[in-house]
Image (cartoon, rainbow, N blue to C red):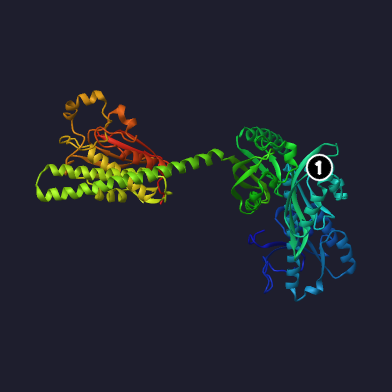
Amino acid sequence: MNGPADSIHVLQVDDAPVLDGTAEVPDGQESDPLTVTTTDRADSALERLEADAIDGIVTADDLPDRSGCAFVDAVRERDSDIPILLLTDSAAVASDAVSNGATDVFRKDTYAGHSDLLVNRIRLLVEHHQSTQTAVRTRQQLTELAEQSDELLWVFSGDWSEIQFVNSAYETLYGRSAESLQANPAEFMTAIHPDDQDSVIQAMQRASAGESVDLEFRITRSDGEQRWMRAKAKPVVEDGTVTRIVGASRDITERKRRESRLDARRSDASASMTDAIPDIFYVLDEDGDLARWNDTMPAVTGYTDTELASMALAELFVSSDRETVRERTEAAFETGEAYFKADLLTADGSTLPYEFTGGRIEAADGSTRGVAGIGRDISDRDGRQQALERQNERLEEFASVVSHDLRNPLDVARGQLELARAAHDSEHLDGVKRAHDRIGQLIEDLLTLARNGEEALDIEPVPLQTVVEQCWQTVETGDATLELQTSAVVRADPSRLRQLFENLIRNSVEHGCTSGRMESGDSVEHGSTPSPEKQENAGEQRAMPSLSHSQGGAADLTLTVGELDDGFYIADDGVGIPVDEREDVFEGGYSLASGPGFGLRIVDEIADTHGWSVAVTESDAGGACFEITGVAFDAA
């Protein structure tokens, strides 16, 4: 039989056929057309049924070789499901045909002049049969797939009163028969551990209300073994009503056992680790009460663990700090973190200054379980801070007095020098001016050292190229050359960074020059204070390559500023610094001649204030190279 692949193939058995070879669907209906194959005999029809793919049969009740009912019986012996429409005008025949296997009966006189009714009827029968077959196959495939799953798959009615499907995994996991569950769905609850039944019932109610649920609970198998299950349920809503609930359950007993063992190990390890902390470790529960603490807590406070367990948190602090503790603790629950200082009140009535930090503990669902934190004794820190403040005050007073007492005679000396210049034109006066300038610089260095730690750092992104170029314009560099090999942006205090570069540039220009001679009065910082032995060989020392330059010198000196992996460097091609003296160059007062050597000490102080490290090495050209590391670069 030939016909379109997407048409309905109908076998017509009638010696007076009413359907054409192709019967179109009536106007206004969307469906496949009918392709009709016609024969007038039952035997021929049975042969075609064996040979061709037939979707439906239309047969008369009075065939030449047998009756329509007998033909229906013969078809049913071969195919129990194919739709058969019997055409008859006899009520008796119609009754017998339906009881003997005909799908439907159509009166012959009905389709006379209305073949479209017959076409529509057989089409509906075939489409219903096909959809039923598809549903049966789909259900069979799903059932086979479900039986291959290790998970328990199930479908309950929307009110949980009827179980519509359950796979055989129920018998494996629960140790009970699936038939007994289908016969009595309430059996499901009898297996739930009594302590978990309320949570399971609440989850079922939420599912019936249209909410998907995911929960874990314990069951007791028929053999008495207790297991852990995890169930996920999703409601199916039709026309606003939950008609059924589908879900899957799986055994998580081994996971629970692993978690229990891990929790036990963590608890033991956690206790050991927190007890090893010299600071107080504490945990507050959701009500803000002490729930856990390490061994340091009773050791510091003098209270026993039993006493601590019965005490309110506020009792551990002096009365003047209790409101602060309460406010900061509430802040930890609300914002997730807290910090405060308060005095602990010990069992013997003494007080200890402590610094506390805390962070919120969150459960997997986001709820707050409590607060955990650390308390640290700051007695030594407070003492050191007070001592440092007193020391800084004395140092500031000393620096101010010294600078004041030095500036007054220096100003007088400078004034007298100007008068001398007006009266006499002598080259020796140039050396006097340089000495005056050096004294002024030393006074500024002294104040810088004294006040360097007073002001807080103002950290911001600073381009190295910009700050070096600014320093090059303000420092007397003579004819020295600058090479910039960096475009890095570092995070630093701009003012302090500029001080650092000014001192490094000044140091290299003044003390790294390889030309000229060492003139009287010039200070040097690339060497050490001469020992008596060296002083005896002063003439020999002056014969060495000069470490300084006269005004306007340094013509052959080149300074290079470049990047390191974690910082930057400034290098020169001068005489360098001997290896055995490099560790001492940052000490205050380190100098070969009359200078006090404050410049590199200032560099070291500024680096230390930023948390950096500074070291001196040899440059590629054999001169001095100062490397500053531990520097944070700006990502932007």
Q: Nearer the viewer, residue 417 or 176?
A: 417
Q: Is any part of residue 205 visible from this angle? A: yes
Residue visible at 13% across and 42% down in the picture: 428
Tell me the SS state at disc 1.
strand
Is 592 rendered above or below residue 145?
A: above
Which residue, given by chain and number where applicable, does mark 1 sit on?
219
Q: Position of residue 267 (x, y in %)?
A: 68, 35
Residue 227 at x, y = what percent? 78, 39
Residue 488 in view of the camera: no
Q: Residue at x 64, y 39 (%)?
A: 281
Q: Nearer the viewer, residue 16 or 87?
A: 87
Asked if 259 appears above or below 137 in the picture, the reply is above
Snapshot quadrant of residue 97? bottom right
Image coordinates for residue 388, horizontal then vertical, percent: 46, 41
507 left or right of 330?
Answer: left
371 or 190: nearer the viewer: 371
Q: Where residue 161 appears, x then y in whole percent? A: 85, 55
Question: The disc labelled 1 sits on which kind of residue?
Answer: Ile
Q: Residue furthest bottom?
A: 113
